[in-house]
C-alpha cells in the first residue's frame, strides 16, 4: 500500500463523509441488532447496501458493481 500524505488523505471530503455515515450506521446496528424489529433490520440492511454503493461511487467515480 502506498503511503499518502496527510493532505492527500483529506482531499476527498465527500468520501470521508460517506464513510463516516457507513461506520456510524454499522455501529448503531451492532449496538441495537438484538432489539430491532424485523422491519428495522430490513431497513438497516437496505441502508447498509445503499451506503456501500455510495462509498463505491464516490471512491471510483462510477456506478457500483453488479
Image (spheres, helix red, strand yellow):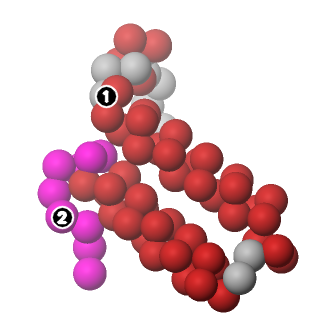
Name the residue that disc number 1 marks.
Answer: 12
Q: CA distance from mark 1 to mark 2?
A: 18 Å
- Identified at 63% across, 58% down, the residue is 26
Q: Which residues are magenta?
A: 58-66
Position of residue 27 measured from the top left corner of the image (x, y, whole percent): 70, 53
Q: Is residue 61 left or right of residue 23?
A: left
Predominant SS of the magenta segment: loop
Position of residue 31 measured from the top left corner of the image (x, y, whole percent): 80, 59
Residue 13 image-quadrant placement: top left
Query: Neighbour class for label 1 at 10 Å: few (<14), some, many (≥20)?
Result: few
Q: Quadrant of the C terminus?
A: bottom left
Name the outermost residue toward the left. 62
The answer to if 62 sits in the magenta stretch is yes
Image mark for residue 63: 2
- Identified at 50% across, 46% down, the residue is 21
Is residue 5 positioned above or below 45 on the image?
Answer: above
Position of residue 44 measured from the top left corner of the image (x, y, whole percent): 56, 71
Amino acid at each position: 500500500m502506498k503511503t499518502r500524505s496527510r493532505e492527500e488523505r483529506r482531499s476527498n471530503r465527500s468520501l470521508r463523509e460517506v464513510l463516516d455515515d457507513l461506520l456510524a450506521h454499522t455501529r448503531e446496528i451492532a449496538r441495537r441488532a438484538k432489539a430491532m424489529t424485523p422491519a428495522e433490520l430490513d431497513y438497516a440492511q437496505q441502508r447498509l447496501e445503499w451506503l456501500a454503493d455510495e462509498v463505491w461511487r464516490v471512491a471510483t467515480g462510477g456506478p457500483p458493481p453488479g
